Image (spheres, rainbow, N blue to C red):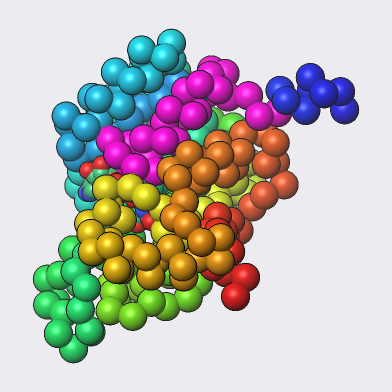
Amino acid sequence: MTTAAAYARLDLTGRSIIVTGAGSGLGRATAQLIAARGALVTVADVNAEAGGATVAEIEAAGGTAQFVATDITDESAVRDLVAAAVSAYGGLHGAHNNAGINGPAALAGDLGYDQWRQVLDINLNGVFLCLKYELAHMKENGGGSIVNTASTAAAIAYPNIPAYVASKHGVLGVTRQAALDYIRYGVRVNAVLPGSVWTPLAESALKDPEIRAKAESAQPIGRLGEPHEIAEMVAWLLSDAASFAVGSPFFVDGGVNAG
Ligand SMILES: NC(=O)c1ccc[n+]([C@@H]2O[C@H](COP(=O)([O-])OP(=O)(O)OC[C@H]3O[C@@H](n4cnc5c(N)ncnc54)[C@H](O)[C@@H]3O)[C@@H](O)[C@H]2O)c1
C-alpha cells in the first residue's frame, strides 16, 4: 500500500456520522476531529445551546455539521435523529453513541432506585435506542461503523458508583452482542473505554484538588486525558483503517487497564 492509500483509509470525506453528547467533552472533540477529516456531522445533544456551539465551531473551521436536539432516552427523538442525518446527508455511515452521565456517588445500599434508573436510562438504554435505529438503517444500506463510549468502568469496578459501573458493563455487553449479529451486514460495532479525561463531566466529580490529584496519580501516565486523545481512537474506529476491528473494547486510559 502506498503512503497516500494508507492515509486515505483514515479519511471520512462525505461520510454521514451522528455524535451524541456532542455539545461537550468527548463528543464535541469527536465531532470536531471527524469534521476536520471530512465527515458530515449530525451533532446530537439534549443541551441545544451547547450543541449549537459545537456546530458553529465546526463551521468556523470549514466543516459541515447540523444540530439535532435529542434526548437519547426518548425513542421517537432518536428515530427522528437518525432520519435527520439520513435526510440531510443522504445516508448514515457512522455513529458515536457517547452521551452519558456520572450519576450520584453512593453505596448501593444508599442509592435511590430512581437515581439508579436515571443512570441506566441514559447510559445504557439511550445507547440501545441509538443502536436500534442506526443498525436498522445500516443493515439495509450497505453497512457502517458504530462506536459506543463505555469507560474503564466497563472492565473494572470503582467504589461508590454502582449504577455507572453497571451501565458501562452493559454498554460493552450490548456492543459485543450487536457486533456479532450485524457484522454479516457490514456493520462494525466497537466500544472505546476512556480513563479519566478532563471534561465538564470529570470536572464535576474532581472539583476537590485532593480528589483530582488522586485521580491523576491513579492513572499510570500521571495525568488526566484530553478529549482529543479519545477522539483519535473514535475517528480511527469510524474509518476504513479499522476494517478488521469488530466487537472489541478499545482502552484509551493512560495505562489504567495495564495494572
Ligand atoms: N470524562 C471522563 O473522564 C470519562 C471517562 C470515561 C467515560 N466517559 C464517558 O464519556 C461520555 C461523555 O462524557 P464527557 O466527559 O464528555 O461528559 P460531558 O458531561 O462533558 O458531556 C456529555 C454530554 O452529553 C449530553 N447529554 C447528557 N444526557 C443526555 C441525553 N439524555 N441525551 C442527549 N445528550 C445528553 C450533555 O448535555 C453533554 O453535552 C459519557 O458516556 C461518559 O460516561 C467519560
Relative image position of residue 102 (x, y in whole percent): 26, 61
Relative image position of residue 251 (x, y in whole percent): 56, 58
Image-based side of 181 in relation to 100, left or right? right
Depth check: give the residue in front, 115 or 204.
204
**Quarter of the image containing the C terminus?**
bottom right
Q: Which residue is drawn at 50% across and 72% down?
A: 155
Depth check: give the residue in front, 225 or 162.
225
Residue 27 falls inside the magenta stretch: yes
Picture quadrant where residue 11 is located: top right
Segment colored magenta: 9-38
Picture quadrant where residue 78 is located: top left
Q: Residue at x 47, y 57 (%)?
A: 223
Residue 147 falls inside the magenta stretch: no
Relative image position of residue 159 (x, y in whole percent): 33, 80
Q: Residue at x 72, y 25 (%)?
A: 7
Q: Can residue 75 be seen in this view?
A: no
Relative image position of residue 92 (x, y in whole percent): 46, 29
